[in-house]
Amino acid sequence: MKRRSFLKNAAFLTAAASAAPVLAGCRREETGGEDSRLSVARNFRYGPDGTFTVLQLTDTHYIAGDPRSARALDNVCEMLDAEHPDLVIHTGDIVFGHPDIPSAQEILRPIADRGIPFAVALGNHDSQFGATREEMYRIIREIPGCVNLPPKEGVYGCSNDVITLSGPGGVDRALYLFDSMDAVILKGEEEIHCYDYIRFSQLEWYRDHSAKFTAENGGTPVPSLAFFHIPLCEVTEGLSNGGNILAGENGEPPCPSRLNSGLLAQMRELGDIQAIVNGHDHDCDYVLDYGQMYYIYGRFSGCDTTYNHLGPSGARVFQFTQGARPFRTWVRLQGGEIRQDLVLDR
Ligand SMILES: [Fe+2]
């Protein structure tokens, strides 16, 4: 049937530093302070009604000037205007061809035009069409509204960031973004090409943040979600080992790295992550409940530049309520249909 063409070379980190963008006229946010390894990309406040809404776009696979991309641009605009999110998180594969930099600027522009803050967790295809991963990330960070910080020195990848939501008592939710990178070649008796995996330096970065938030929260882990492009290999295990798909479509097997990164074990030990949110597998948009963790796919937000068999494009929405551990999620489709309206209470 389909399957994404396999990967090109993995890009490696060189720290690119530029000043964080200033977002004019944007509500519910505070600056994260000085850039350092443990900086928070942005701290947001809940709205007057006590909620905060995140729109997840994923796999727009945009190609500027290609008529097959028109529907992706329409979809992004429709999702933004229907949901009026407080924050957009794009979980990668933003672009899918030449010219890659203008493509990224064009598909993210509707977010900036509406004055909505956004963050990205880059996908495997975002550094395969000319620009290096660092160049692509730097250009995206220059778009007004982008809250991503510069790459952290010594932390693998570019788009590793944490965003916090605060109530009167301080931080009560964290949203982690990891860079799941592109591909890696494992050298052994034979070369094995596979998707990259979350590296130890990223685990360490996450652990340090998590421990800090837990300490500041009187020893109780702060409810958190993790967003990144390529799913963990535990999704495959969950599907074959009694995991329960609560809602959504399962149109293809997961395509994770062949290497277990240890990220899930780290999350379990720290006790803060309620859900892992991915893109990458375009024909999946389900919520899997397995082993005290929710594995959630976004809804394919792209167009006909790549494989997609779910029907209408769309986006996934997350709604968080101040002081409440449960969160709500649903999928919005182009045309207005709402699916999978769930309250996840772990
Ligand atoms: Fe993709």
Image (cartoon, rainbow, N blue to C red):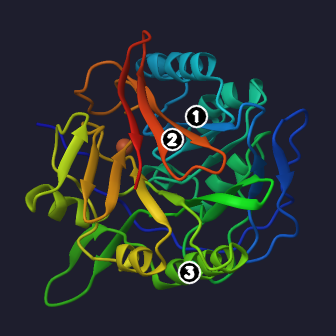
Q: Position of residue 171 (x, y in %)?
A: 72, 61
**Tags 2 and 1 in contact by the CB under 8 Å rule?**
yes
In the rendered structure, which amino acid carries the disc numbered 2?
Answer: Ile
3D distance between C-alphas at marks 2 and 1: 8 Å
For mark 1, give the secondary structure.
Answer: helix
In the rendered structure, which amino acid carries the disc numbered 3?
Answer: Arg
Q: Position of residue 22 (x, y in %)?
A: 89, 46
Q: Is residue 320 above or below residue 158?
A: above
3D distance between C-alphas at marks 2 and 3: 28 Å
Q: Position of residue 337 (x, y in %)?
A: 38, 14
For mark 3, give the secondary structure.
Answer: helix
For label 1, the crowd category at 10 Å Cα-Cα, with few meaning under 14, some 14 to 19 and many 20 or more, is many
Query: Which numbered disc, 1 or 3, marks the residue that appears first in the sequence?
Result: 1
For mark 2, give the secondary structure.
Answer: loop
**Tags 2 and 3 in contact by the CB under 8 Å rule?**
no
3D distance between C-alphas at marks 1 and 3: 34 Å
Quarter of the image for residue 14 reads bottom right
Query: Which numbered disc, 2 or 1, marks the residue that appears first in the sequence?
Result: 2
Which residue corresponds to mark 3? 207
Q: Which residue occupies 50% across, 79% down?
A: 203
Which residue corresponds to mark 2? 94
Residue 235 image label = none
Which residue corresponds to mark 1? 103
